[in-house]
Amino acid sequence: MLSGERILLGKVNDATVDGREVGKVLILRDRTELHTVLRDRDGALDVTQALRAQAHEFANKLHVISGLLELGEQAKAVEYLGRSHSDAAFVNRPLAAGVTDHDVRALLIAKSTVCAERGVEILVSPDSVCTPDGTGDVITVLGNLIDNAVDAAGYDSTVAVRLEEAADGERTITVEDDGPGVPEPERAAVFEAGVTTKQAEGINSRGFGLALVQRVARRRGGAASVSPSALGGACFTVVLRTKEAELQRL
């Protein structure tokens, strides 16, 4: 369950005295840090699988080159090397110059690299802007929105990211995909804790991500919403306001 922005595990036990039930005992354990560790573990597993796939691809190319050299086809081996490339290479993918928050840049590069192995292309709008704000709120929101979009869209899909920042520091984070989208009657419910449409197992399938995103947005005086995407799927928009932006709005 979510309590504010803390993830809690609850357990109820019977309280008995002399064999007679006199009440209930509720035990709450804070699993926020564990949840974060498990998400990091899932990310590490994705990277491991990506490396394994690249190693397999690299080995296949070496076999081709070795065979060509054994056949005395040096020219063809050189030509093959020129044509060979890795579409999912771990490279520093170009990002918008306006994204100067190093944590956000690192997140986008990591997500883009891992998602490429799943056949998902993450496109960052070239006019995106994101400067450091001294909190981890953008990372929390953006990470959860990208994970949700990738899971919803599935293999061979596109996820588009746009980061905007107003003069007063108000931030707008938009993530959209070309998946099945969210039907209008279900749009409000997707931000409730425990609600999920994901079929995959794991820490990200428990319905906490979007609920946490909404609570972060509300704490920052903003809001989270979902609408149809121009890509054909869902478009999630989150507004994070600063204290100065809240005062100007009021």
Image (cartoon, helix red, strand yellow):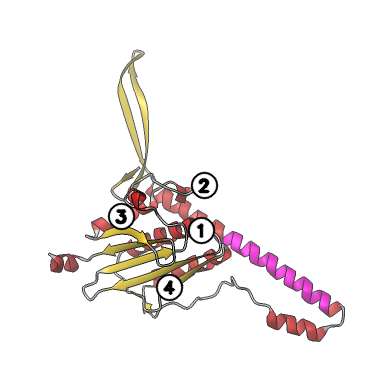
Q: Which residue is mark 2?
A: 201
Which mark is first along the chain, 1 or 3?
Answer: 1
Please give the label number shown on residue 124.
4
Quadrant, the C terminus: bottom left
Picture coordinates of residue 148 (x, y %)? Answer: 43, 57
User: Against 195, is 243 above or below?
Assistant: below
Whole-percent x, y for residue 169 in the image: 24, 71
Placement of 216 over or under 81, stated as above or below? above
The residue indicated by pointer 3 is 214
Task: Find the distance from the CA under tag 3 to the CA under tag 1.
Answer: 23 Å
Q: Between disc 4 and disc 2, whose residue precedes?
A: 4
- Report the span colored magenta: 47-68
Which callout, 2 or 1, points to the residue nearer the camera? 2
Label 2 or label 1, whichever comes before in sequence order = 1
- Which residue is disc 1 drawn over? 43
The residue sitting at 40% across, 75% down in the picture is: 125
Query: Is residue 139 toward the left or the right of residue 55 in the image?
Result: left
| Real-space Cα separation, disc 4 to disc 2, in angstroms | 28 Å
The span from disc 2 to disc 1 (Cα, nearest Å) is 14 Å
Q: In the rendered structure, are the residues bearing label 2 and label 3 in contact, judged by CB atoms less than 8 Å apart?
A: no
